[in-house]
Image: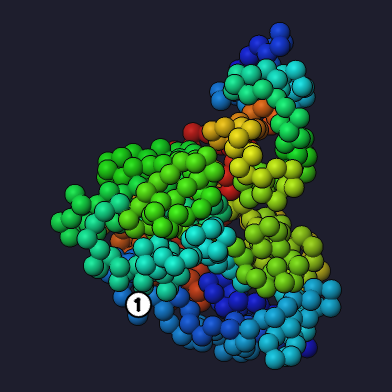
Amino acid sequence: MKKVLANREIDVNEEGYLVDFKQWDREICECIADECNIVMTEKHWEVIEYIHEKHKNEEPLSIRGIKKSGVINIKEFYNLFPGGPLKKATLIAGIPKPKSCI
Amino acid sequence: MKNLVILGAGTSGTMMANHLISKLPKREWNITIVDQFKTHYYQPGFLFLPFDIYTTKQVKKKGEKFIPKGVNYIQKKIELIKPDENKVQLEGDAQLDYDILIVATGTKIAPSEIEGMDGPMWYKNIFDFYTYEGAKALRNKLREWEGGKLVVHITEMPIKCPVAPLEFAFLADSFFKNKSMRDKVDITYVTPLGGAFTKPKATEALHHLLEEKGIKEVTDFNIERVDYENNKIVDYADTEVEYDLLVTVPTNMGDELIERSGMGDDLNYVPTNKATLQTNDYENIFAIGDATNLPASKAGSVAHFEAEILTDNILRYIKGEPLKAEFDGHANCFIETGNGKALLIDFNYTHEPVEGTFPFPGVGPLKLLKESRMNHMGKMAFRWIYWNMLIKGIHIPFVSTNMTTKGKKLEKINN
């Protein structure tokens, strides 16, 4: 699927997650955040950076992982990305929705 | 003489002892298995114990019975694994040397991870059913419970047997119907996942069943604490669910031994190659079953399939041959749906559970992802298979180690 964000055509899946991380940049990020009614602050960017780092190292994201991240506690995480923070944060970060291990 | 040491005499460890005793030359290899507990539990039976479907006697036997002759069985607590010295420290200063080590120490519930969970109301109106003690205490509670809000809850993933909490909800529905008190019980299923199960196709089928049985679902619920004074669970988004009886699956963690030995991840699971079962950090240490961090179900069927591949790989390792990267994450689970029926699911790392027939393509007799009495009988027969075949390492006829795609309605393949 194609979607226009920041006047560019971006490839996304049916849930709106970016298919190609190379298309992600801060401008795109702010557009997606805006669609989620989130205004990016410095703390948001720190979390996005942490998520990218995890993604790069192929480490699965989890609520428990957030607790131990040293970047943010879980309560703050929920406040920054209200309603399903892992799903929202990955959407904004331009990486796939976290799959739960079975 | 060389030494192969197995840590843990649960489902995986016992199976490995049985496989290896006939495969390793007796003149060259000593096999030792260590477990501090004398009892071997039939863990799938813990689901049935609370509903008086199984008796306590049906779910436990002496572990010794299942350790083959010729294997040295030590009943002592394991203090420490010293991977750099190839030694295992046991209680009372005893020490074991190993050439090959198999870690099969399983997973345990850790209710203390959540504030208020194992506080003063633990085993009063908050129960687990993943331990013998929990399942038995819950049975006694259910015998006299007069109804109210029953909440079946999962704390966080991964957990042993991800379908068990759903089965518990289904069986509770039948149990209260049979007691003619279903109208007095409100059942809610609370999960941190986005749906009833981890895989989309099965989630759809299971969601439908929950609806049919009048069981409410609360999804995406990441618990922060149990407010045991006001009988409610609270999540990080401040969502609250009230209960009169809370049946929870606490956080699951690997054995503390793994943490003490500095060999685990955040949840004390041993980082393990998902196809060969060799640990990532030590080439002469292998891990199997619930003790690993494999992205597969923590379940006996998975351990069973792993054991066949790990046996091959240990023999290859001894001969200095390359390991077979063969484990595909195969899991095969009966899902009890109540009223004498069950579903069957068969899946692996890349294929989600779909409809079809099992084990014979097109014939069955078992149907995948559909409720039937035959599947329920399969589940009941499994207790006999477990005690008499599975942990003794006898191959179960017609069920292949790697998942087969024959006889299945495959629609899409992930990854």
Give the percent coordinates (x, y) of residue B10: 54, 74
Q: Is residue B254 left or right of residue A49?
A: left
Amino acid type, mark 1: Thr
Residue B9 vertical placement versus A25 (above, below): below
Q: Chain of mark 1?
A: B
Residue A32 vertical placement versus B258 (above, below): above
Give the percent coordinates (x, y) of residue A71: 74, 43
Element on which disc 1 rests: helix
B281, A16: nearer the viewer? A16
Task: State the residue position of label 1.
Answer: B56
- The 10 Å Cα crowd at callout 1, few under 14, some 14 to 19, many 20 or more, is some
Work out which quarter of the rendered image holds the C terminus of chain B and state it. Answer: top right
- The quadrant holding residue B14 is bottom right
Give the percent coordinates (x, y) of residue B25: 70, 83
Q: Residue furthest top?
A: A7
Residue B317 vertical placement versus B325 (above, below): below
B381, B157: nearer the viewer? B157
Work out which quarter of the rendered image holds the N terminus of chain B and state it. Answer: bottom right
Tell me if residue B26 can be seen.
no
Q: Residue at x 71, y 63 (%)?
A: B264
Tell me if residue B9 can be seen.
yes
Q: Residue at x 57, y 78 (%)?
A: B9
Colour option used: rainbow
Q: Residue at x 75, y 39 (%)?
A: A50
B374, B210: nearer the viewer? B210
Give the percent coordinates (x, y) of residue B21: 62, 81
